Image (cartoon, rainbow, N blue to C red):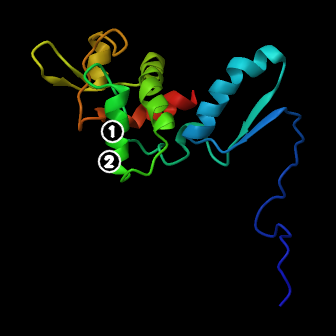
């Protein structure tokens, strides 16, 4: 049996565009968006060109695009990176690189704070301890997590978000 060759019977032949770049990111999921953001911090000042190519609209592609209800790791003020290492070690039955896990626990909150700065609606506790959804918290100018706002947790490490905005905020 001969292999089939696409002769574009059912669609137009796509235009081929050549684009010169120094850094090519393939895919538009959360990892690629994070890579693009981090690469821009150092590559632009070096005169390097960054290109991200995705098969779909970046703000609506990838596993996160349909929305999530929580961010799965936020250490916050009530936990420490050492607590996070103990949790991961136990969860993975001791098979872990504790130095890397410690760095995640040490740095993850900064990433969540950045997402909140960019407009991700994060659920907060008000003065009476009531849970306030992220959009309402934003409308009411509640204190950000960075400034000491209290997140609503769905577990020891998870914080609630209005996840339909997650990928849109990050992709932007």
- Of the 4 image quadrants, the one containing the N terminus is bottom right
Please state which of residues 121 and 160 is positioned toward the viewer in this rendering.
160
Q: Are marks 2 and 1 in contact (CB under 8 Å)?
A: yes
Please state which of residues 29 and 104 is positioned toward the viewer in this rendering.
104
In terms of secondary structure, where does tag 1 sit?
helix
164 relative position to 6: left or right: left
Res 131 quadrant in image: top left
Q: Residue at x 14, y 12 (%)?
A: 127
Number of residue marks: 2
Res 7 quadrant in image: bottom right
Q: Can see residue 171?
A: yes
Q: Can see residue 74?
A: no
Q: CA distance from mark 2 to mark 1?
A: 6 Å
Res 161 quadrant in image: top left
In terms of secondary structure, where does tag 2 sit?
helix
124 relative position to 145: left or right: left
85 relative position to 8: left or right: left
Please state which of residues 99 and 59 is positioned toward the viewer in this rendering.
99
Check disc 1 and report the residue beneath it. 86
Q: Residue at x 70, y 22 (%)?
A: 40
- Of the 4 image quadrants, the one containing the C terminus is top right
Q: Position of residue 99 (x, y in %)?
A: 49, 34
Check disc 2 and report the residue beneath it. 90
Relative to residue 142, is residue 51 depicted above or below?
Answer: below
Mark 2 neighbour class, 10 Å CA radius: few under 14, some 14 to 19, many 20 or more:
few
């Amino acid at each position: 049996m001969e292999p089939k060759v696409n002769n574009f019977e059912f669609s137009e032949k796509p235009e081929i565009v050549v684009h010169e770049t120094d850094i090519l990111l393939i895919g538009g999921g959360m990892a690629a968006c994070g890579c693009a953001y981090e690469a821009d911090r150092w590559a632009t000042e070096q005169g390097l060109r960054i290109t991200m190519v995705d098969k779909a609209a970046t703000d609506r592609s990838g596993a996160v695009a349909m929305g999530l209800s929580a961010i799965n790791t936020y250490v916050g003020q009530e936990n420490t990176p050492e607590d996070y290492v103990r949790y991961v070690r136990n969860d993975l039955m001791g098979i872990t690189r504790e130095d890397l896990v410690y760095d995640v626990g040490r740095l993850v909150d900064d990433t969540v704070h950045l997402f909140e700065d960019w407009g991700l609606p994060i659920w907060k506790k008000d003065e009476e301890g009531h849970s306030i959804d992220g959009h309402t918290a934003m409308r009411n100018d509640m204190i950000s997590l960075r400034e000491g706002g209290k997140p609503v947790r769905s577990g020891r490490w998870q914080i609630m978000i209005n996840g339909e905005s997650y990928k849109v905020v990050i992709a932007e």
